[in-house]
Amino acid sequence: MSLNKQHLTMARSFGVAIVVAVGLSSCATYKDEFATINSRLDQLDVKVQGAAQSAESANQSAQQANQRLDQIEGRVQQLEQAPRRKPRG
C-alpha cells in the first residue's frame, strides 16, 4: 500500500471515529434532555392528580349541598304557602 492510501485510510478511520464520538456525545445530551422532560412530566402528573382530587372533593361537597337544599325545599314551600298570621297588637 502506498503512503497516500495509508493516509487516506487513516483519515477515513479518524473521520469515522469523530462522527461516532459526536454521535455518542449528542446521545448523552438527548438523554439529559429526556430526563429533564420526564421529570417535568412527572411533576405535572402530580399536579393534575391533585387538581383532580380537589375537583372530586368539590363535586362531592356540591352534591351534598344540593341534597340538603332538596331536603329543605318542601318545608320552604309549605311556609310560603301557609296563610299569613296577623300581627298581635
Image (tube, helix red, strand yellow):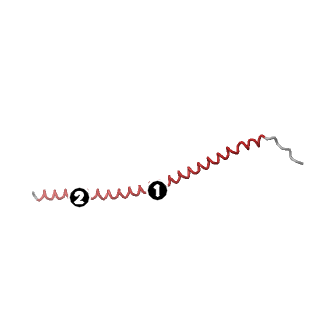
Q: Is residue 78 left or right of residue 63?
A: right
- Tell me the SS state at disc 1: helix
Give yes or no for contact between labels 2 and 1 (Cβ–Cβ under 8 Å): no
Q: Is residue 36 left or right of residue 73?
A: left
- Give me the residue at 22% from left, 56% from top: 16
Q: Earlier in the sequence, mark 2 or mark 1?
A: 2
Question: Residue 41's spot in the image, x, y percent?
Answer: 44, 54
- Give me the residue at 59% from left, 49% from top: 60
- Give me the residue at 18% from left, 58% from top: 11
Residue 82 lies in what quarter of the image?
top right
Question: Residue 10's spot in the image, x, y percent?
Answer: 17, 59
User: How many C-alpha atoms fall within 10 Å of the one at disc 2: few (<14), some, or many (≥20)?
Assistant: few
Q: Of the residues shown, which amino acid type is indicated by label 2? A: Ala
Viewport quadrant of the N terminus? bottom left
User: How many C-alpha atoms fall within 10 Å of the one at disc 1: few (<14), some, or many (≥20)?
Assistant: few
Figure check: 80 above or below 46: above
Q: Is residue 24 left or right of residue 1?
A: right
Cα gap from disc 2 to disc 1, whole angstroms: 39 Å
Q: Of the residues shown, which amino acid type is indicated by label 1? A: Gln
Residue 22 lies in what quarter of the image?
bottom left
Q: Is residue 80 left or right of residue 57?
A: right
In this rendering, the label closer to the viewer, 2 or 1:
1
- Tell me the SS state at disc 2: helix
In this rendered view, identify the residue nearer to me: 60 or 54.
Answer: 60
Question: Residue 42's spot in the image, x, y percent?
Answer: 44, 55
Work out which residue is located at the far left of the displayed protein and give it. Answer: 1
**Residue behind mark 1:** 43
Q: How many marks?
A: 2
**Residue behind mark 2:** 17
- Give me the residue at 27% from left, 59% from top: 21
